[in-house]
Image (cartoon, rainbow, N blue to C red):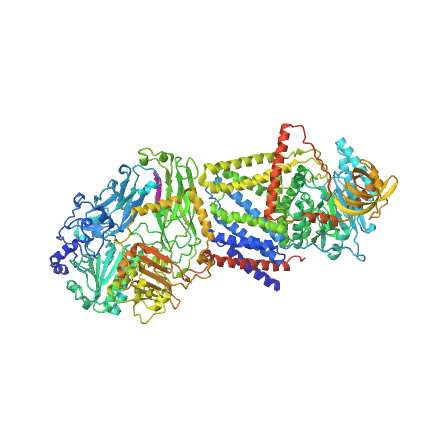
Amino acid sequence: MINFFKVTIWAILAFFYVLLVTLPISSQAQLSIDVIILVSLVVLKLLAPKGSLRIVVLAFGSAIILRYLYWRTTSTLPPVTELQDFIPGILVYVAELYSIMMLGLSMFIVAMPLDSRPQRRLKEDEEFPTVDIFIPTYNEDEELLASTISAAKGIEYPPEKVEVWLLDDGGTLEKRSSSDMKAAHAAQQRHESLKLLCENLGAHYLTRDKNEHAKAGNLNNALAHSSAEVVVVFDADHAPSRDFLLETVGYFNDDPKLFLVQTPHFFLNPDPLERNLQTFKKMPSENEMFYGIIQRGLDKWNASFFCGSAALLRRKALEETNGFSGVTITEDCETAVNLHARGWNSIYIDRPLIAGLQPATFSSFIGQRSRWAQGMMQILRFHFPLLKFGLSFPQMLCYLSSSLFWLFPFARMIFLVAPLCYLFFDLQIFDASGRDFFVYTSVYMVVNMLLQNYLYGRFRWPLISELYEYIQTVHLLPAVVSVILNPSKPTFKVTAKDESISESRLSELSLPFFIIFVILLVGVAVSLVRLFTEPYKADITVVVGAWNLLNVILAGCALGVVSERGERQSTQRVKVSRKCEVKVGGEWLPATISDVSVRGAGIEVLGKIARTISEDDEVEIRIVPLADLPENILPVKIRHTENTADGVIFGCEYVVKNTQHNRIIADLVFANSAKWSDFQKRRRTNPGVVGGTMGFLRIALRQTARGISYFMSRAGKPKTPVPAIVPPEESV
Amino acid sequence: MTRLSLRPFAGTFLLAFLCTQATGYAQPVPFSMEPERSDIEQPRERDQPPPADIPYLTEPGGADKRPAEDADAAVPPKAEPRVVAAPSAFRRFIVPDAQLQMRGEMAARSWSVVLTSEQAASDATLQIAYRNAILVAPEASLLRLSINGNPILSEHISSPDRRKQLQVEIPGGLLNAGRNLFSISVDQRHRTDCSVESTFDLWTDIDPAGTFLQFDNAGASRLRQISDIAAIGNNGEGQTLVHFVAPALEQMNSHELLLRLVQNIALIADMPRQSMSVMTSPPADNAAALTVYFGTAEQLSVFPAIRQQLGGSPVASFANLPGAGGSALIVSGGAWDDVARAVDSVASVATQIAAEIPDDLLRTQNAVVPDPPLITEAATFRLSDFGLGSREFSGRHFRTELSFGLPADFYAKAYGQLTIMLNAASAPSVLPGSSINIYVNDELAANVPITQRGGTIMNRLPIKVPLRHARPGLNTITIEGNFETREDQVCAPGQTANQDLRFVLFDTSELVFPRFARIGRIPDLSSFASFGFPYDTLPDETHLVLGDTRPGTFSAAATLLSRLAVAAGKPIALEADVSTSEMPEANAIFVGNIADIPQQALSQVGLADVARSSWADSTPTRKKTLGEVRDNEETLENWRKKLSEQGWRGRIYRLLQTLQNSFDLTQQNLSFSPGTGVAYAPPVGTSLLFAQNVSPDRGGAWTVVSAPNGQDMSSYLDVLVDRWPGLAGDVSALQTDSDEIFSQQSGAVEYTVTQPLSFGNTRLILTNWVSVNIIVFGGALLVVVTLLGLATAGLLRVFGRQS
C-alpha cells in the first residue's frame, strides 16, 4: 500500500518533470535554464552526495539530456526532401539516440548500486556443500595450467568436499585422431602430459570424444561426470586465492534459489591499451567499471550475470536447463539469462578472489572483444531481453543494457564520419544555428561528461571510454555486422592471453588506424581552410571542426595503442610480507618475501653472508605453506641483487622442477586476496572532468607522436624492429 | 413622384457646391435627394461646373491638411499636366493611404476598390500621379498597374523632378460592381550603383491625391442602398470621413443607438482609415464622404433639406442633398423606437455583409489584398495562398511581403516560431556571403546565408522564424534576399540593368504554422486594438463612459468604436448612457480628457497620478501631416541598419547579442509577478493615452482612452489610424509630433480562457509563460527535479535489493 502510494507520487512528479523539461521554450529561456541546472549540478557534484542526493544529481543531469533530446528531435532533423542530408542526418540522430538510451539504461542500473557485501565467511558449524572446481582448457600450456590447478588445490576447504577437474578440450579423442598427423601427435602428447600433471597435483583429468559446443559442451561433459552441489568455473589462466570458497560458498546456504555467485576478474597484467599507454599502475583498468560498479548495479536488480569464470553455480539450477547453454558463443551470459528467467537468483561479490591474465596483444584483445560482441548480439537475437518471459522488468533492462552496449561500434563510427560529411561534402546533417548549438548541444555534452564522471569517476577517467570504444570499433564493426547478418555463424574462439611481445612493433591490425588518422587530419586542414575562405559560415565550421578535432585526438591516441611496446611479459607484483628462509652455502638464513608475482619474488635476506649470492645463481627458499603441502622448498634463480645494511635484497625467478613447486608458488602468490583489492583501490582515484580531460590530452599528444614514430621507423626500415625496451619490474 | 418633386433643389445648391469643390475632396457631385430605392433605373444628367483645378494643385481648404510632398514639390502649376475633368465627372480616389511609396528594386501592392454598379458601368479613366527618386534608371525601371488582373499601364519610371500625371482609359467591362482588384508594382534599378545599399535609394511615390478613377457618368457618385456604403471610398489623403449629425446629442438615451449606428456604418464601409465625427449640425464645408442625419423626425426637422423624408415610420435612406459635400443618409423615425428600428435595418445589412466573410480571414482587402488568413491552429500555407506568384529576380535586393493574422488570444510571442519551407534557387553568379532574411513586422527574425558557390537549389529548406515580434491581429512577413555577384563588384556601366537572373522564389514555398498557445490576457491593448478583445467576446454589454458629451469627445468615442467594430468584425454591444457618477463594476471603456475620467477608473488602470501630472494640462504639438509619411533619409537609415545585421559579421554579432540578452535577465524575467507600484508618467509630447486593466469585478476589462485637458481627442484618434497596431501592453502613449507609440507592460496580467484548456494548449500556455518568467521556471524546475530525485531514491529503496 505504501509502495503504491510512493509509486503514485513518483509518477505524478515524473509527469511534471517530463512536462517541464519538454516545454518548447525559447532559446533564450533555455540558456537561463542551462545556467541554473549546470550550476546546481556542479555544486552538487562537488559536494559528491551519497544516497538520495545522488539520485537528485542524476535527475538534474537527465533534465538537460531530456531537453536536448526533445530539441534534437523536434528542431534539428534535416528535411526528408534533401536525401543527401537526411540519410546521414538520421544516422547521426539514431546514433545519438542510442547513446542517450545507453546512458539512460546505465543510470537506471547504477543509480543506487549495492554496496560491497559484508564478508560472509563460512562458519565452522555450517554445512559445507560439496564443490567441483572446473578448469576448462583448450590450448593453454602446461606451466600455466599447473599454476592454476595448484592454486585451486590450495584453496582452503575440507579436502573431502572439493574436487578439482581439468577439462581438456585440446586432448579430445577427436583431436588425437585428427587426420593432421602433427596435430594429432601434439594432442596425444598434451593429453598424456596433462593427465600426468593432474595425477601429480591431485586433480581429475577429463576429456571427451568430440569438441561439441565449445566451452559450454566441455563444462556440460564435466557436469555429467561429477556430482557436487556447487560447481566452480575457473578459466585456465584464472588462479583463485586460498580463501575463494570460504568467502563465497556460504551464500548458497543462505538462499536456496541462488544459482550464481560471481566474483570479479582481477588481472595481473595490463591490457594492450594499458601496456602501450603505460597507465596500468595509475589508472583503473577497463574492466573495473564493469566489476567495480556495473555488476554491483546489476546485483541490486538481481541481474548480476555469469562472466565465464571466477564464479560458483548451483548444480540443481544448471540441471533445470540441462547444463550450460550453448546456443550463443557467450555461454556464460546466456546461461545466466536463462536461469534468471526461471526465477533463480544471482549475487555478485565485489572483491577480487582470483587473479588472471588478459590478452596482451592488440590483436588478441580485439579477438576477445569480437567474441563478446558477437555473443551479445546473439543474445539480443535469440534471447531478446524485453521479450524474455520470466525476467523481471529491471532484469530485462539490465540485460538489454549489457547486450545493446555492443552496438557501440555503429554509433562510434557515425560520430567519426559525420563531421567529415560537412567538411568534405558540405552536407547539412544537423539543422541548428550556432546559437542553438551552443545553447543545447554544448551544454548537453558538458552535462554528459559531468554525469559520466559522477557515476564512474573512480572507475573510468574522462574520454577513456571513448578511446576504448574507438580502438575496438574499427575491427568490431565488421564482426558485429556479420553476426547481425548471420546470427548463428560465429564460433567460439579461445582468446590467447599468454602471448608476449619481445620487440616493439606495430600491431598487425594497425593499418586502418593510420589511414583514419590521416583522413581526419585532412579534415582538420579542410576546416582551417574553410574557416578562412568561407568566413560567412565560420560558426558552423568552428563547431564541426571542433568535433572533428576531438576525433583526431582520439584517433591519434589510438595510434599509440596499436604501436606495441616490446616488453617482456610483465606480471604484476603484489606486496606481501611473509617470512621464509634462504639457503646460502648450506645455511638457512632468515628472510622476508616482500613481493610476489606468478613468475618471481623479491626477497630480503638477513646475514652478510648472503652477499655472496650473485646473478644467475640458483638458490633454494623454504616457506611455511598455508595449505597442507608435501613439500616446502622452492628453487629460484637470482635476477638481480642489492646489498642492504644487514644483508641483501634480491629479485628472483621461480624454477619449477616438479609440480609440487607449482603448489608452493600458488601458496605464495594466491595466499591473500586482500592484497589485490589494495592494488585496485590505489588506482581508483577520480581526476575530475577537467583534470582527467587535460591528462587525456597529454597522453594523446604523446601517443600520437609515438605512433607516428613507430610507423615511420617501420616504413623506413621494414625488417628492423624497434629495439625492445625491458624495464625493470617494479613492485607496487 | 418623389423624384419629380425633388428636382428643383438641384439648382438651389449650386453655389454651395462650388465652394466645396475647392476642397479637393472626392465627391464633387451634389446628391440626389431621392430616398433609397432599388427600382431607380437611370440617374439624371446634372449640370455641374468643372472643378477649379486638379485637387493637389489647389490650396488646402478647410481644416484638412495636405500631403507633405505638396509643399516641397514646389512645381510651377503650369508645368504640370492638367487633368481636366468633364463637367459632370466624379472622382473616386483609389489609394487608401496617406502616402504610397514603392521602395527598392521590387515592390508591389494590391488592394481592392469597391464600386457601385453604376460606377462599374460608367465610362471611366484612371489617373495616376507619381514622382520618383533621381537615382532610378528610367530605361530599366517600370511602373505597372493592373485592374482585376488586366494590365492597363506599364510605364518607364522617369519623373524625378516633378510629379507626373498619367491618364489611362479603362476599357469597358473591366470594372466590376463590388470589389475590384488594383495592383501596382514597380521594378526599379539604380542608374549607376551596383551595391545592395544603393537599392535603398530607389523610390517612387504614388500620389494618392492625383490617383483616382474618373467616371464620366455623374450618377456614379450616387449611393442608392445601404450596402452601397461599402463604396464610399476615401479622399485624396486616404481618409474616409463620416459625419453624424445628431441634433439631440445631449440626450442621454440616444448615445447607445447612435454608437450602434456608427459601428454598423463603419462595418459596412470597412475602409482602412475611417474617421467618425459626431456633431449637432453639419459644417458649412462638409467634406465628409458620408453624412448621416440621426434623430427623431422632430429633431431632424431643423434641417429643411431633409424634412420631406422624415415621418413617423422608421427611415434609413439616402437623401440627395446638394451642397452637403458627399452622400447623405437619413436614419430617423417618429419616436426613438422608430429610430432604433431604422438603425436595425442598417445593422441587418452589416450583419449580412459580415456573414459573407469567412471566419478564417482578416478583413484587410480595402487596404491590402488578399485577406490574410487568421491562424488559429496548426496550418500550412503556400506562398501562392498569399497571392504571391513564383518570382524570378535579376537585381540585388529581392523583397516580397505577405501578411497573416493571429487571434486575440495568441500567446506564443516568447517561444513560438513558424517554419518557412523555402523552395528557391540562386544562380551560379551569386556569391557566398549573399543571404536571405526573414523579417516579422519589420524586425529581423531569421537569416539564411547562401554559402555555396555555383548556385544553390533550396528544396524545402526549413527556416525557423521566431514569432518574437508577432502580435495579435495583422502581421507581416518580409522575405528579403541580398545577392552579391562578381559583376556587381566590378559594376561596369549598364550592369544595373543586367537582366541575368540571380534568384527565383517559388510560390510552392510554404509557411508552416505550428499549433500555438491560446489564452486571452487582460490587459492587452494589442488584442484590444486588433480584435476589440475582450469586449468582442463577453456576453454582457460594455459600458461606455464618456468624460463629457461634447461632440469632440463623442467623435473620439465614435472613431474608437468604429475601429473596434471593424477589428472585431461586429459591433460592440454597448450600454452607452452611463454617467460618471454611477460607476459600473463590469466591462467598461472610458473616453475623455484626463480630468473628466473618474478617479476610480484611473486608479484601476494604473494612471492614478496622471490626472495631477503636468501632462494633464500640456498641449502636445501636432505633426503637420496626417498619417504615415516616411522621410526618405529616415528610410535609408533604417535599411542601412538592417543591412549591417547581415552577413557573417552580423551572425556573430547577433549570436553574441543573443547570449548577452539571455544572460541579461530583465526585471520582468526576474520578478515573480510583473512589477507594480511605480506610477506611470506619460512621455513628453503624449497626445493620446490608452490604458487598460482588468475590471473591478474581474469579469472583463476597463480601458481608458484619454488626452490632456482641453484637447480635441478626435483629431488625435485620426492620427492614431496608422499607428493602431502599435497599441500594446497595458499602457500606450501616442505622440503626435513624432507619430510614435510607446507601449509598455508594467502591471500584472489576468488570463481569461478563450479556448478549451486541453493538455496541449495548457502546455503551450505554460511554455510561453515560463519563457517570460524564467526565474520562476528555473525555481519550479529545481523543485520538481529535486523532488523527483528524492522520490526516485525512495522507490529505489523499496524496489530491488538493498545494501
Q: Can residue A352 be seen here?
A: yes
The residue sitting at 45% across, 39% down in the picture is A535
Count of marks placed on residues: 0
Counting from the top left corner in percent of width and height, residue A171 is at: 77, 38
B399 and B171: which is toward the camera: B399
Residue B496: image location, x then y, percent: 32, 36
Q: Is residue A438 above or below residue B727?
A: above
Main secondary-structure element of the magenta-colored stretch: strand
**In the depicted structure, whether residue A462 falls above or below residue A512:** below
Q: Quadrant of residue B395?
A: top left
Q: Is residue A609 left or right of residue B54?
A: right
Q: Where does the N terminus of chain B fall, quadrant-wise?
A: bottom left
Relative to A143, is B178 on the left or the right?
left
Q: Quadrant of the C terminus of chain B?
A: bottom right
Does residue A204 appear anywhere in the picture?
A: no
Asked whether, in this view, residue B157 is left or right of residue B87, the answer is right
- The picture places residue A135, in percent across and down from the top left corner, at 76, 44
Q: Nearer the viewer, residue A438 or B685?
A: B685
**Where does the magenta region start and end?**
B390-399
State yes or no: residue B398 in magenta: yes
Residue A232 percent across, percent down from the top left: 75, 48
In this view of the protein, which residue sits in the foreground, B718 or B336?
Answer: B718
Judging depth in this view, the residue of A505 and A413 nearest the camera is: A505
Depicted B325 relative to depicted A212: above or below: below
> Which residue, as the protein is rendered here, is positioned at the far bottom?
B582
- Residue B333 horizontal side relative to residue A609, left or right: left
Q: Is residue B366 magenta?
A: no
User: Which residue, as the protein is rendered here, is positioned at the far right?
Assistant: A586
